[in-house]
Structure formats: C-alpha cells, structure tokens
Amino acid sequence: MPEPSGVLSSIRDLLRFAVTGFNRAGLAFGHGSDNAYDEAAYLILHTLHLPLDRLEPFLDAKLLPEEVQAVLDIIQRRIEDRMPAAYITREAWLGDFRFYVDERVIVPRSHIAELIGTAFAAWLPQPERVQQALDLCTGSGCLAVLLAHAFPVARVDAVDLSADALEVARRNVDEYGLGQQIRLVRSDLYAALTDERYDLIVSNPPYVTDAAMQGLAPEYCKEPALALAGGADGLDVVRRIMQGAAAHLKPRGLLVVEVGAGRAAVERAWPGIEFTWPETAAGGDQVFLLSREQLPR
C-alpha cells in the first residue's frame, strides 16, 4: 500500500483523507467544531497558514511534499493522541476573538460568550453603568477579555484557583492589551475579594457530574479535571457561587452562570427561585441569570 504522502497532493485530497480517518477512529468533537469535516478543514488551513474562513479557493491547490507531510503529521497526532485540535494549534476562537490555550486550561467554548456579545442587552439596558465586573473560574481569561470589550469603562476581575490557568489568562490579557482593565486574582471563588462589589458576575464553573466524568471521551480527559468536575449533581461549585453572590453584587446587580445540561438539577436545588434561562445556540437550558434581589441570603 503506498504511503499517503505519495498519493495525496491537494487540499481536497487531504480533507477527504482526514475526514475518513477521523470518522474511522471515532474521534470526539466539541472543542471548536462539532464534526469531522469542520475540524479537518480547520487543522489543514491552520497548518498551511491559510485564512481559516477561505477553504474553497484553495481546495485544488497542489501542495509541496513538505506541506503534505506537515498536514499528515497533524492528522496523525489528532487521531493517535486524541488531542483536542485547540491544544494542537495552541489557539481557540470565541466569535472573532482568538485566544491562546494549552493543557493548563479547558478549551474556551462558553455559551456566556454569546450573551456578552450583546452586552446582556435585555437585562442590562444601560451597559455604561457597569463599572465593575467579575469572571469567576476564568481559566484562559476568555470571558474576562470579552467583558472588557463589551463594557469598556468597567474594571474586570478575573479569578481562578489554578496558578497555571492564570498564567494562560495573563498571556491572553496581555495580547489584547487589557492589563490596565483586567485584574487577575488567584482565589478560591470569592475568598480573596473581601469587600468587592460588582455590577455583573459571570461564571463558567466546573459542572460535569461524577457519573459523566467517568464516561468522558479521551479528548475531554486531556483537559484539567479541576475545571470540569462538579460533584455528584454537577453543582458543588455552583452552590458556592450562589451562596456568596448576593454579598458581592451591587443592588440590581446580575449573576450569570453556565451549567451545561444542569437546568433540572438547578431547579431542584433552588425550587423557590425563578431562574431566567436565555436562549443560546445550544438552547435555553445552558445558562441562568439572576438579579441580586432574587438570590438566597
């Protein structure tokens, strides 16, 4: 059987080869793309230093042997190591925003990003009044960067327990030139924030249940478990966020928390609270919103 590098000469050839290989290997997706075709296209375009949104003009371009080999090496690594594409390329995207990532942080994919993109218009009709914002469990710092762009007059605190994660966040904050607006804080949730009060708190905390952690695909097992594991019902960290939020929100302040598939568990845990579940690309059960006045005291 001939070596692939000897019979593959165009991007179209490599794309077909990669999609077949990804599907045959049963890879898991969800770290920037949700299917084999999109992931293959992204990895090929990135490896060849081509625009990520311009596949068609290059499909039949003939590649140099060393270019073919570079792409094949990436395809092989994705299949054999089951490494998320973002860790291979060292980048992840939320909308038009690019972030550096590596194995010290989970790959950015929060649905809160969509809501930040509209500055929470339905719930914060005067975004210029947001003077202080907090991103709990910041990881790569991606939501903090988005907050700083959406609320340019706000000071943003970005908190994480992991010193390694904060190193990644620092790189992203610096790349966007936001060092004067975003303060990185190593803290177990609110512990180091003492008397701070915020107009807006957002969090994409660990929320994967113990049962789901046991069944994670290899790609997700490459991510730090500290940023994923949420306990028996997925709400261990969410409960602590809820318990401290009222003390750290200003009057009419807003709490926004992502819980994945945890809506039913949330509503069981706090049956007396009327949560708001805004629509995102993943549906209306991924993220909840509460005002300070709705929070348990």
Image (tube, grey):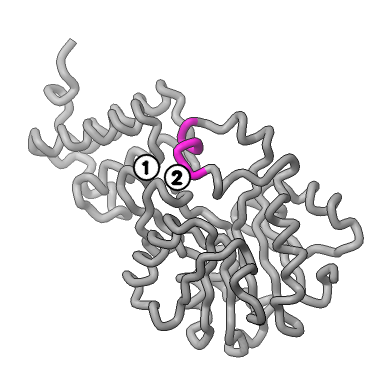
Q: Name the amino acid type tagged 2.
A: Ser
Q: Earlier in the sequence, mark 2 or mark 1?
A: 2
Say which residue appears at 46% left-offset and 64% top-offset.
141
Query: Does 40 sit left or right of 157 as displayed?
Result: left
Q: Where 288 falls versus 182 (above or below)?
A: above
Q: Residue 131: x percent and y percent?
A: 58, 87
Q: Where 183 falls versus 264 (above or below)?
A: below
Q: Name the amino acid type tagged 1.
A: Ala
Of tags 2 and 1, which is closer to the observer? Answer: 1
Q: Where 105 falls versus 196 (above or below)?
A: above
Q: Residue 259: x percent and y percent?
A: 67, 53
- Which portion, as a residue range, is magenta? 218-224
Numbered label attached to residue 214: none
Query: Does 269 sit left or right of 29 as displayed?
Result: right
Q: Label 2: which residue? A: 33
Mark 2 Cα within 10 Å, few/some/many (few <14, many 20+)?
some
Q: Residue 199: x percent and y percent?
A: 65, 81
Query: Does 217 sit left or right of 9 as displayed?
Result: right
Question: On the rendered image, what quadrant is the N terminus found in?
Answer: top left
User: Residues at badges 2 and 1 in contact (C-beta under 8 Å)?
Assistant: yes
